[in-house]
Amino acid sequence: MKVSEMLIPTLRETPAEAEIVSHKLLLRAGYIRKTASGIYTYLPLGIRVIKKIMNIIREEMDRQGGQEMLMPIIQPAELWHESGRWDVYGPELMRLKDRHNRDFCLGPTHEEVITTLVRSEINSYKQLPQLLYHIGNKYRDERRPRFGLMRGREFIMKDLYSFDRDEEGLDKSYQKMYQAYTNVFNRCGVTFRPVEADSGAIGGSTTHEFMVLADSGEATILYCDSCDYAANVEKVSVPAAGLDPTFEKLELQEVATPGAHTVEQVTEYLNVDQHQIIKTLIYKTDKEIVAALVRGDRELNEIKLYNALNCLTLDLANAKTVEKVSGAPVGYAGPVNLKEDIRIIVDPEVAGMVNGVTGANKGDAHFINVNPERDFKIDLIEDIRMVAAGEKCPSCEGVLQEARGIEVGQIFKLGDKYSKQLKANYLDEGGKENPIIMGCYGIGVGRTMAATVEQNHDDNGIIWPVSIAPYHAVVVPISTKDENQVKLADNIYGKLLENNIETVIDDRKERPGVKFKDADLIGYPVRIVVGKKAVEESMVEIHNRNTGETINVSTEEVISTVQKLLFAK
Ligand code: ATP
Ligand code: MG
């Protein structure tokens, strides 16, 4: 196409709304525009990239035996009541009513739709296994939509669902998807790492997230420096060190700590180490209020706590609630003599502590020599803490390191969670009814696009991997007033198209500097400049966006050189 006839609204200034590089560049280079918070329009260049990523995904799903279909965005509430998720999903589920006042939602995911479909269409072991997928819009009313396509409220996802007769079949389907995801992200040209993860609200057991490594990533990954262990920090669990039996348990004592209520202030005031403090956090779930205890030098892991409590919602209690259950101002709650009898959940490190320090449930006072079991009741001992970089690897003697990641895909073994609930069964050879064993597998298409930009850019703009670039090449005539140059540029443009090289020609009546700036910003992998030398000496300039190199080649060699730059392995 001719750039003069295209809608590529590049911007010189960075829009104030954008915080991270990919968001800034996708706006500036004219790929996307915001329609509402977390809701975007893909402009002509944007949708070309999206379609290329979709096609890579399609090819890799199909290669593993995936079958494409298309499910509706609008889903009836009954399906969600049946699965029990209408309430679990909470405010993230976008709900609506039709003219008959019937409830619907905009699908945030499609387990309900597909499982009920399979329930009616599959009855026999002979029809299994199946791998079914679609690519479409998903809707989640995210608490904090941000970073452009990274965390939208409307976004494009590929979701595949596997249906097998048993766990062994599921293992095979899961392996296939693991391989397909590896191929997809390799082909998209990103550096990524599959990591073990928590299965969260969706349920199920084994799950991996595919993380594109980038400092702007919202996820923290811990990986081992000597084996191949890697996991989302939410998931990492290491055994607590055993009790030191040589410590003598001293007598519980209340001490005054005027003004000291943070861990730092208390350690300083009492001259103790942070790891001697028992941090007491009051949480409110949909069912109860609990106290959760971790060591003073640790962070509580809300995902672990959520799983341990088997609740639907979990939030830190507000000051009023804390004051009510502890009987003290915020900062002085502790497990000894809590005013209200609530469940106390204790991290193993705290359970094994000798002579700890806690709030005394009154202002400006703490207990020292606190010994769990002896001094307060324990309702549940459960790993509820965050593991940090520098700790020992859970699977070898190595040390854990930290990196940031963008979750571009996730694969889950669901087992029979949905099929049992929704009664999706099959009959085996013996005529016995069994639940179908399921897996689900998602890729964020827009997030993959944004993550690619996070990893592939420089100060001048985007550097697309050839596989997903909106166009392969741009031809730039230096002077649009010079008829010979224009003719020659047109000629080269035509030849590139004939050779299936996706090319645009920048025929705008702009200065060359403006065109070069736009070309760099947009990130065409190859730029072919047709200037004076082209007319006089039959030489054109070819610029490689990735390496920054410029070479001069004769007009005859343009096609072969561009092909080599783009497609040579
Ligand atoms: P996150 O933890 O980032 O909220 P998730 O674990 O809830 O994501 P999944 O349900 O696993 O997301 O969805 C599959 C994929 O869809 C994710 O790996 C991600 O690439 C993409 N995705 C999820 N939520 C969004 C969103 N709000 N905007 C863009 N892409 C998203
Ligand atoms: Mg996920």
Image (tube, rainbow, N blue to C red):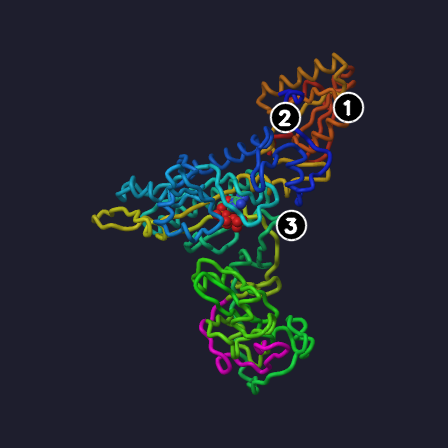
Say which of 87 and 487 sits in front. 87
Q: Secondary structure at mark 3?
A: loop
Dot placed on the residue nearer the N-terminal end, 2 or 3: 2
Residue 86 falls within the magenta-colored stretch: no
Q: Which residue is mark 1?
A: 511
Q: Nearer the viewer, mark 2 or mark 3?
A: 2
Q: Nearer the viewer, mark 2 or mark 1?
A: 2
Q: Given contact means CB atoms under 8 Å apart, are the residues at marks 2 and 3 in contact?
A: no
Note whether ligand 1 is within 8 Å of mark 3.
no
Query: Mark 2 belongs to which amino acid?
Result: Leu
Q: Name the image quarter holding residue 298.
A: bottom right
Q: Secondary structure at mark 1?
A: loop
Q: CA distance from mark 2 to mark 3?
A: 32 Å
Horizontal side of 204 relative to 233 (left or right) equals: left
Q: Which residue is mark 2?
A: 7
Find the magenta span and give its range: 359-383
Q: Position of residue 189 (x, y in %)?
A: 59, 39
- In the image, what residue occupies the spot 51% across and 35% down? 54
Q: Main secondary structure of the magenta part?
A: loop
Q: CA distance from mark 1 to mark 3?
A: 36 Å
Query: Mark 1 belongs to which amino acid?
Result: Arg
Looking at the rendering, in which quadrant would you find the N terminus? top right
Q: Which residue is mark 3?
A: 215
